[in-house]
Amino acid sequence: MRVSRATRLSLRLVALGYLFVLLAVPIGVILWRSFSPGLSEFIASVSTPAARSAINLSLLIVVIVVPLNVVFGIATALALVRGRFRGRGLLQAVVDLPFAVSPIVVGVALIMLWGAGGWFGALDQAGLKVIFGLPGMVIATIFVTLPFVVREVEPVLHEIGQEQEQAASTLGANRWQTFWRITLPAIRWGLTYGVVLTVARALGEFGAVIMVSSGFPGVSQTLTLLVHSRYIDDHNTYGAYAAATLLMGIALVVLLLMTLLDRKRSDR
Amino acid sequence: MITVTSARKNYGSFAALDDVSLDIPSGSLTALLGPSGSGKSTLLRSIAGLEGLDSGTVTIQGRDVTNEPPQRRGIGFVFQHYAAFKHMTVRDNVAFGLTIRKRPKAETDKKVDELLEIVGLEGFRHRYPAQLSGGQRQRMALARALAVDPQVLLLDEPFGALDAKVRTDLRQWLRRLHDEVHVTTVLVTHDQEEALDVADRIAVLNKGQIEQVGDPVTLYERPANDFVMGFLGSVARLGGQLVRPHDIALERDRTTALANDAKVPDSPGVIDAVVERVVPLGFEVRVDLRADSGERFAAQITRRDAAELQLREGETIHARAIGRSSVVDVDPALAI
Amino acid sequence: MTAETDQQRRGAADAAPLSPRPGSDGAGATDAAELTRRDGTRPEDDRPVGHDGHPGHGSPEPRRRRLPRIGVAQPLGIGVVTLWLSVIVLLPLAALTAASFGEGLSGLWDAVTAPSAIAALWVTVLVSAIVAVVNAVLGTLVAWVLVRDEFPGKRVVNALIDLPFALPTIVASIVLLSLYGPNSPIGLQLNATRWGLVVALLFVTLPFVVRSVQPVLIEADREVEEAAASLGASNWTTFRRIVLPTLAPAILGGTGLAFARAIGEYGSVVLIGGDIPRETQVASQYIQQQIEIDRPLNAAAVSVALLAIAFLTLLLLRVLSSRTQRREERDV
């Protein structure tokens, strides 16, 4: 289609205008509001004891969730790509399920399973507090981030096929050696991409976590819960802006990594 | 020596290998030749242990390896699409088998250097597979397979993914390599020219069974049946018999033709045919003919003969078979 | 890049005459036919390729008796994976569904049809539908501009599209509040209105349509458009008759995903929405509220309703996309 200059310019104007109003302006405003009182004010706001503990808790969740997702994500992707078994299609659907479930519903479902009155309520009575404790937040985060590693690794496994692995086995490598030396290096960029997505979502998850957290400042508040409680409970608007800006900074780093990795991935 | 005994392999109702037995002598270069779905790749992969047999046994150098995984069979395997380890340099690819075996670095380096020289990739040790051409990648894969000193070298359509020119070059090169290294080699191919060119023994497979095993000359000149004859070269049907197109002589004079034909035993006789087309193919000339019976066939004659005959399209000519041309009776010693 | 050259090489090998076969007689012709089929692509092709008319993939899975295993997928691994997915994903959802039936089907029905629940679901679906439609139009437009237009800074804009995916939803909420909230610098207060919900959901669902249309637009065969133009079609006709039908599955897919996401969204609407029952309270907020006031049955029931809407949307999408795919395959 050869579009006239006028049409092209007006289409461009509409598209960029839309993005400007929806993305750029709000982000500009919050940056301005966060930093206009000065950098020291901003740093003070994100390094209060409550903020420090929120950052630590968010990072702790990431540190627990990422390795679990990597191990089980790779295992699931391998089973889906290489496995020939009944119910593979079902497994496939289960992996996609978390994308279709509202975070709030995730929270409710976890309460129904792990909560005091739930199926595994006995655990709660025995003193293992899942809901309103760290385990609940970890499980909720795993639920929402479960598809990322699988979905990023799966296509790469498909693409590389099994010939390289077979070649390694004819050269004397056993299953572990083949996995470590051939399969893992081949999927590394896809895996990294999946991990980046997992980290971003784990740090940013709000709905599912707020349902299963007791939300005490300094104890069970993640960064996202801190933003929420500062705005709603403390009416500390500036504090909420500052914490949100911190999270946004992390998101921008993630975005940058995604863009770089995307190029790396498609280089292969 | 590789011995395959009564090998069977089914994919669902499809028999990829239907009671196949085959001996491959030590030091030989044997080609498994056959059309798609004939089971040749399955047979090779069964020898390698990349496929399991439903029944039957495989022994390599007298050792029963039927239930051994590939890594314990002492084989080298070369894949059609190279199966290059993309994230490793040429050096690391070739060294892989030795690294797995935890050989000392000095020994590994020496071996790798040697092999890279043999395959002509000395200058490429630090390149990645993506920086090599297809032919170079395949030579790297060969070096990689040879690095572990395999008892047998198995090649699955190794030149199938390469273009025609590179393919012929590599074929010659493989032949010379085999003459130097002398490792028992099995090559799967669907290309009869490649098999005739490179192998000293050929096993022709069809529909999961072995049709004939023998040296190239025997297979070409004394095919056990129509299938082998048809697969190992082009054929023309002349008076109900299969004849190679270059074994057809064309004569203007019917009497001379009959006289000449009388000297050939069991010949299909002299066939009158209309010249439909004359196609010069460089050294040779192909003549498309239609017999009185309506059957079409082609003869391949030399340029000089064609010039002498001065063929014109539409005229009638007399065709006869020369020398030993038709399918011979099945020789029990050759057929399995 | 390597894949491409490989492809070309394979293509070249395919095109090269496999065997010069003179002769046009019957036997030669059959052989030639067999040889063209032997494309020499993968070694697996040597297995049941077109065997007496049955396509290879139609035959049952290979039997694996006595197969020495080389892959990593093991029965044990599959078992562990299944267990993991069950504990993390399936069991909670099963417990949720069971809880929603706590007082039988009528209890579930009553909980879902309670006026405030119905109102929340209605607001959710209405707002999500508006968001989906806006996304379909403007998302396609943005994708078109990003693919077919050239302007300085295009790559930055392109990268920015993913920002809503990377940004925590609660941050999206705060970000939008800072602009459209109580002390809006532009004097536009959208908080606690349905328009506030729409804007928040547009923000978080922005990438869906753009990212699903973009690759299709890149791959689209521009010669077809040129052909249409050469046949006298105007730009608008070309777009409507040629471009749009090509993009339709991608637009539909992206829109459906955006709708499914909007239905369940919580973080981005929690601050800007205002949570006013029957006005701006969406289903996820209603569910959260029911948990707070200790009505787990109500929460579970509306959760199941929400899940059902999301699944129906995705199911519909799958049916539609497989139908268009089938139609295209038939056409070819």
Image (cartoon, coloured by chain):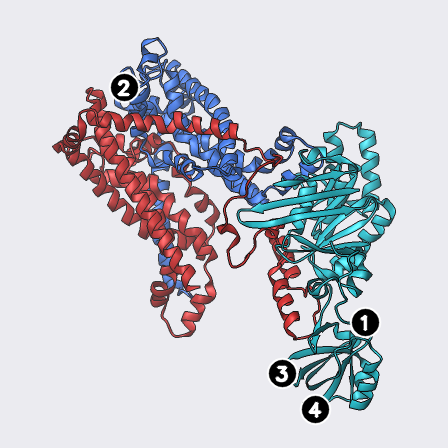
Chain colours: A blue, B cyan, C red
Residue bearing mark 4? B315
Furthest residue to the left? C115
Residue A234's disc number: 2
Vertical relation: B105 (above or below) B45: above
User: In the current view of this chain or complex, which residue is farthest to the top?
Assistant: A126
What subunit carries mark 1?
B
Q: Quadrant of residue B225?
A: bottom right
Q: In the rendered image, which residue does mark 3 sit on?
A: B294
Q: Is residue C115 left or right of residue A68?
A: left
Indicate which disc, 1 or 4, sits on the residue closer to the N terminus: 4
Which residue, given by chain and number where applicable, does mark 1 sit on? B324
| Residue type at the position of mark 3 | Gly
Q: Categorize mark 1 by other alpha carbons within 10 Å: few (<14), some (14-19), many (20+).
A: some
Instruction: Quote the CA–CA distance across marks 1 and 4.
Output: 28 Å
Disc 2 with disc 4 on a shared chain? no
Instruction: Give the CA distance from mark 2 to mark 4.
Output: 106 Å
Label 4's element? loop
| Above/below status of B51 relative to C26 | above
For residue B335, above or below residue A178: below
Q: Residue at point 69% right, 46% down?
A: B44
- Of badges 3 and 2, nearer the viewer stands 3
Whether residue B195 sits left or right of residue C148 in the image: it is: right
Classify mark 4: residues with Cα within 10 Å, few (<14), some (14-19) or many (20+): few
Percent across and percent down for residue C25 are 65, 75
Q: CA distance from mark 3 to mark 2?
A: 99 Å
Q: Locate residue B49: give its quadrant.
A: top right
A32 or B237: nearer the eye?
A: B237
Between discs 4 and 3, the one toward the N terminus: 3
Q: Position of residue B137 (x, y in %)?
A: 72, 48
Locate the C terminus of chain C by quadrant: bottom left
The mark lying in front, picked from 4 and 3, is: 3
Q: Chain of mark 4?
A: B
